[in-house]
Image (tube, rainbow, N blue to C red):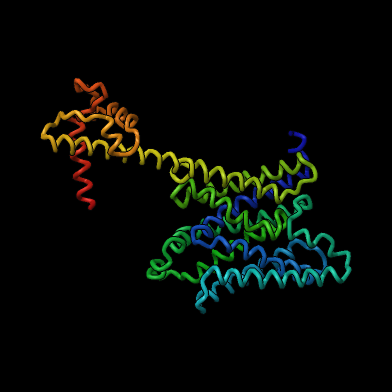
Amino acid sequence: MLALLLDYTIQNVMIGAALLGIVSGVLGSFAVLRRQSLLGDTLSHAALPGICIGFLVAGTRSLPAILIGALATGALAALVVLALTRMTRLKTDASLGIALSTFFALGVVLLTHIQNQGSAAQGGLESFLFGQAAAILRSDIYIMGGIAFAALLLVTLVWKEFKLVTFDAAFARTLGLPVLALETLLTTMIALAVVVGLQMVGVVLMAAMIIAPAVAARQWTDRLGTMVCLSAIFGMVSGVTGALLSATARGLATGPLIVLAVSVIVIVSLLFAPGRGLVFAAFRDAENRRRLHGHRVLAALYRLAAEHNDPAYRTEQKMLDAYFGTGTSGVLKRLQTLGLVTSTSHHPEPTPHWALTAQGIAQAQTDLMIGDTNR
C-alpha cells in the first residue's frame, strides 16, 4: 500500500479525485436543494461541444483550452435553461432536457468531425466522454486545484446570499438581492465543478459526482452548513477510494469506480441514516404501530370499566383478542411493564384477566381527551 501511495501517477489521480469530490460535493448540495438534480447531467453533457471547440482552437489536446471551452458551453447551457424557464412556459425539467440533448448532439457532431480529420493530435480526445484519470499530470492538478479553490472561495464569500436564494428566492427578491444574477453565478459554478471532473470521470458520469454526495449528505442532517461539509467529505472519500481501487485492480477504470464508491455511500445513507434512513423509518413505523395498538387496548379497557361503573373492572383477555381480531398478549405485557395495567384472575374463570391501574386510568383519560380534541 505504501508503494502505491508513493507512486507519482497514483498520487496525481488521488489528488485529482479528492479535489473533484470536494468541489462537486459542495456545489452539488445547492443543486440538490434547488431540486435541479438534472442540472449536473445537463452541464456535463453540454461540456462536450466546448471540449471539441477548445481542441479546434488550440489545434492540440491542450487541457487549459479544453477546460475553458467546456466551461463556456456549460455556462451557455445554464443560461439557456434559465432563459427557457423564465421566458417561456416550460418547466425546469423540460428546459434541462432540451439543453442537454441539443448541446450533447452538437458535441457528438463536432467530435465526429474532428475524428474524421485523421489528425494524430486528436488522439485520446474521446476519453473525455468516460474519463481517463491515469493521463492526469501534475500540471493538470494545479489547474484543477485553482478552479476548485476559486469555486470554494466564491461560495464562502457569497454564502448567505446563496443560502437565501436556495431556500427562499422570493424573499431574497423582496430584500433587493439580485436573484437572477445569483442563480446564474451558482449555476455557472456548478459548471465549474463539471469542468474539474471531466478528465477524471468524463462527461457521461460527471452528473453522479454532482448529485450523489449531496443526496447522501442530505440524509444525515437538516442544516445546510453540515450538509455541505458532509457532501464534500463523501465526495473526497469516494474519489480517493475509487482511485485506490483502480490502482490495486489493474484494468479497471478510475471514473466508474469513483461513481460506484459514492453510490455505495448513497445506499448506506438511504438505509441507515438516523431520522431519514429506510431502516430507521421501518423501526419507527413499527414502534408507532405498537404504541397505537397499546393506546387502543388501554382505551378499550377504560371504556369497559366505565360501562360497568367499576374502575377496577377485570376484562378477560380472550374478549380483547376477539374485539381486536388479533392477539393482545404482547401489548398487555408492555402495558404492564409501563405500570398501566395489572394481571388479575376472575374465579371461577381460569383464563387471564386484566384491569387498569390508577396510572392506566389517568393515561387512558388523557389519550381519549387528545383524541376528542383532534377530531
- From what the image shows, is residue 190 above or below residue 110? above
In the rendered image, which quarter is residue 350 located in? top left
- Count of picture labels: 0
Query: Can you give x and y, in whole percent of width and height, for residue 156 in the image?
Result: 51, 56
Q: Residue furthest bottom?
A: 87
Who is closer to the viewer here, 197 or 295? Answer: 295
Residue pictured at 21% horizontal, 32% vertical? 360
Who is closer to the viewer here, 5 or 122? Answer: 122
Query: Can you give x and y, in whole percent of width and height, for residue 339 in the image?
Result: 25, 27
Q: Is residue 89 visible?
A: yes
- From what the image shows, is residue 266 above or below residue 305? below
- From what the image shows, is residue 23 above or below residue 274? below
Residue pictured at 78% horizontal, 40% vertical? 7
- From what the image shows, is residue 44 above or below residue 213? below
Going by the image, does 60 lie left or right of 78?
A: right
Residue pictured at 52% horizontal, 43% vertical? 271
